[in-house]
Amino acid sequence: MFDFVKNLDLNSIVDEGYLCTLAQNQLNSNRVSEAVNLIIKFNLYKSFNIKELIINLLDSNHNNLTTARMLINQEPQFKEEIVERLSTYKNHKVATSLLKDFNLKYEDFPKLKEIEENSSANYFIARAFVDPTDPEYMTIYKNEESFCGNKKMLIELSRVLLARN
């Protein structure tokens, strides 16, 4: 417990059960970040499903990434599973960030790797369809050159081009 709890003689009121209830009330009110802060500060990890909290925290708001990292650092056995569960089109940027932070390998996450490749291909292909005066503009020929040797990207470029005509 914090010193102020002892100094103010609040031990009879503020115990682990009270703090768990307080954290649970925060969760029930969809205030996941506040609940997680209580769990971290008062070391209440055993009373909650940390894996689900991390997912809910990142799902609700990607700005909670720092708080989620603190939880993951306390429960490192969930690193791979969290990255795998976040390997969706909605959360792939967060998953990639965690992958890099924890020095994990892309090869271990084929779903995330495929999403990142598709996302990258779509980014470059979309640049061919912006106004030619835009600084982001990239000709179709330049796209084709940059995808040279990457059969999957060339197929995606061809698919988009055929869909546009």
Image (cartoon, rainbow, N blue to C red):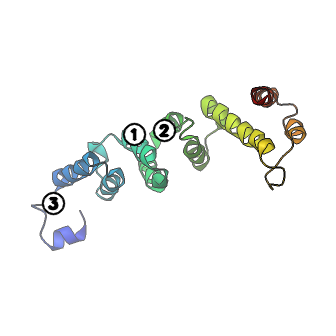
Element at label 2: helix
Residue 87 image point, x, y percent: 55, 35
Q: In this figure, which residue is indicated by the disc labeled 3?
A: 14
* Mark toward the start of the polypeptide (3 vs 1): 3
Q: Which residue lies furthest to the front in this view?
A: 165
Q: In this figure, which residue is indicated by the disc labeled 2?
A: 82
* Mark toward the start of the polypeptide (3 vs 2): 3
**Amino acid at dot 2:** Ile
Query: In the rendered image of this protein, does residue 64 appear above or below residue 84?
Result: below
Q: In this figure, which residue is indicated by the disc labeled 1?
A: 51
Distance between the alpha carbons at the discs numbered 3 and 2: 32 Å
Query: Which quarter shows the N terminus?
Result: bottom left
Distance between the alpha carbons at the discs numbered 2 and 1: 7 Å
Element at label 1: helix
**Amino acid at dot 3:** Val
- Identity of the residue drawn at 12% across and 70% down: 9
- Identity of the residue drawn at 48% across and 52% down: 65
- Identity of the residue drawn at 74% across and 41% down: 126
Query: Which quarter shows the C terminus?
Result: top right
Residue 45 image point, x, y percent: 31, 47
Work out whether residue 59 or residue 163 is closer to the camera in this orientation and state it: 163
Work out whether residue 4 or residue 120 is closer to the camera in this orientation and state it: 120
Label 2 with label 1: CB-CB less than 8 Å: yes
Element at label 3: loop
Residue 121 image point, x, y percent: 74, 37
Distance between the alpha carbons at the discs numbered 3 and 1: 26 Å
